[in-house]
Amino acid sequence: MKTFVTILLAAAVSLVVVRAEEQEKDETLGQKTSEAWDKTKEKTKEAARDVADLTKKAADTVTDALTPDADARKVEVKLTGHAISMPTKLESGKTAFIVHNAGNQAQNFNVEGEGIDKKFFAPVDPDQTKVLHVDLKPGAYEVLCPTNNHTKKGMKLKLTVK
């Protein structure tokens, strides 16, 4: 009988030890899960800050597209029907073309020449104004509206830069 009680006692102690080890594993797993959750929360906060920063930069870029740089020469451009009204002789250097669409349909503004080919990514809607920055070098340029064959209808002019 003593042997049987000893065996039962040994089995009970073993069971308690196994249970304690399992509980310790569960606590370790719980701690690891908690740590992983904390890391996930921190990474999410970092991602949110990055998105906010990128959104602010994008908004600033849009604002810049509507505002001439302070150090740029400002040139007023008016798009009407199938005509471009602007000076045809300019000095070289950083230039902000302030393009106003006085027509009744969307139009674009393109400056080509001397290795430069710049235009707006999206057209200028009627009664809207956008700014196109170009660093002009001395030489000959063509200014045109590439929208809906407007160039073929005469919406282009020669620009001379000294």
Image (cartoon, helix red, strand yellow):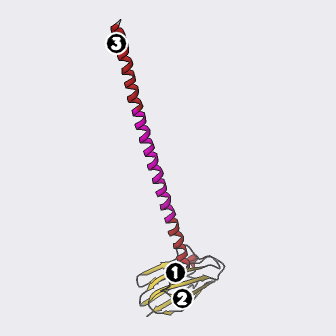
Our reading of the magenta stretch's main secondary structure is helix
Residue extending farthest right: 104
Q: Amino acid at mark 2?
A: Val
45, above or below 100, in the image: above
Residue matched to label 3 = 6
Closer to the camera, 11 or 156?
11
Q: Residue at x 41, y 90 (%)?
A: 138
Q: Amino acid at mark 1?
A: Leu
10 Å neighbourhood of mark 1: few (<14), some, or many (≥20)?
A: many
10 Å neighbourhood of mark 3: few (<14), some, or many (≥20)?
A: few
SS for callout 1: strand
The answer for how far apart the CA atoms under marks 2 and 3 are is 101 Å
Q: Which mark is residue 103?
A: none
Residue matched to label 1 = 132
Residue 32 lies in the magenta-colored region: yes
Q: Amino acid at mark 3?
A: Thr
Residue extending farthest left: 3
Residue matched to label 2 = 75
Q: Which of marks 3 and 1 precedes in the sequence?
A: 3
3, above or below 79, in the image: above
SS for callout 3: helix
What percent of the width, then of the height, locates residue 162? Answer: 43, 94
Q: Residue at x 44, y 41 (%)?
A: 33
- The residue range painted magenta reads 24-53
Closer to the camera, 123 or 65?
65
Q: Residue at x 37, y 10 (%)?
A: 5
What percent of the width, then of the height, locates residue 124? Answer: 59, 77
